[in-house]
Amino acid sequence: MKDLMTPALETRQDPENTTDPVAEATEAVTELRTAVTEHQTRQTTEMRGVTDRLAALETRMNRPGTGTETTTEPGAEQRAFAAFVRTGVERMQAEEVRALTVSTDTAGGYLAPEQFLAELDRNLVEFSPIRAAARVASTSAGEILLPKRTAGPTASWVGEGGTVGGTQPTYGQQKITVHELACYVDISNRLLEDSAFNMDSELAFDFAEEFGRAEGSAFINGTGDANNQPKGLLTETGIDGITSAGASIGVDDLIDLYHSLPGFYASRAVWAMNRSTIGEVRKIKTISGDYLWRDALAEGNPPTILGRPVIEFPDLPDADATEIPIIFGDFGSGFRIFDRVNLSVLRDPYSVQTSGLVRFHARRRVGGGMTKAEAFKFLTMAA
């Protein structure tokens, strides 16, 4: 008797179906292969279309005059600072005022946000050429004390069983004072009212232009703490060099200056001179008639003299009698700049309002000075 609880076995085809199962399976496999091939073809076509569109978009973006910068949403602090510049704190919303950082100095004002400071620092290098070569760091102190070795140990020759004399290096400290640098710029009310005008970039450029001009001059010709400014390279003591053989700069003068600097510093040194001196140096030829000056081989690289880069320092004097028109030195090892990164901006809508202008006062603190005299050599013109 058939067990009623045992399920009947199911088969793919009914008993009366006479279709060949092998042929049916082959047909199913063929259909599957065809479907896969069609899918792959369609996917390849779609991907090719996407690739072509991306290539066309990249081509358009790389054309001159089309901006490729990626825009990011400004932070709350940056938006608040922009509102402060345009309207003043009196017309700002409460949440915007809270996003501002109040300056703690007695002059008042608000501290610029990090994005503004970053752009300011980038622009400063364009106007303060010494920043491109010197070692720059940030500080929160009013004075920086740097250790300085004033004398080294002295070794002596001794014979067998002889007594070795004692010696030791001596160290001192060098103080660099952080001084205050201030300026102001005037911006018209119309520009402030124009929402399409990038006020942050404009202010950063204007402040950097004035700060860079002032500090670049002080780092070369500054007279020191007595006049509330850094001491410049030309007013420092302890830096020696060579004197030119004649009334004008000659090829031998540059070669002698190059080799007067120790090799450790010469391998990283740069030439510093103003534009007028650069014009004279570019005309100098060797005995064989070759120019000593070498133009940059690629865009963005500086020209070179004897293999070392040249940086234009507008604050150096011309090549006149007894002047120092050229400095050859390792600024990275021998000159330090310390920034107080907090930049305070005070908005004054009253002083020049009769002329339709708003005045922005900016102040920052920066210090700098020579830390190694042996890293520099001067070319002094003959009397």
Image: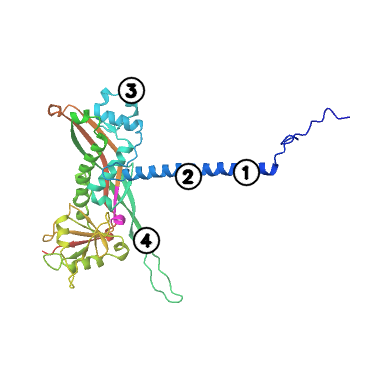
The residue to which callout 2 is attached is 44
Q: Which comes before the other along the chain, label 3 or label 1?
A: 1
Quarter assignment of residue 323: bottom left
Marks 2 and 4 sit apart, C-alpha to C-alpha, by 74 Å
Residue 169, numbered circle: 4
The residue to which callout 1 is attached is 29
Q: Is residue 257 left or right of residue 148?
A: left
Q: Amino acid at mark 1?
A: Val
Q: Residue furthest right?
A: 1
Asked if residue 332 lies in the magenta stretch, the reply is yes
Q: Position of residue 72 (x, y in %)?
A: 35, 36
From the viewer's perspective, is the residue at label 2 or at label 3 nearer? 2
Q: Residue at x 34, y 39 (%)?
A: 70
Q: Residues within 10 Å of mark 2 (few under 14, many from 20)?
A: few
Asked if residue 98 lies in the magenta stretch, the reply is no
Which quarter of the rendering shows the C terminus?
bottom left
Magenta residue span: 331-337
The residue to which callout 3 is attached is 94
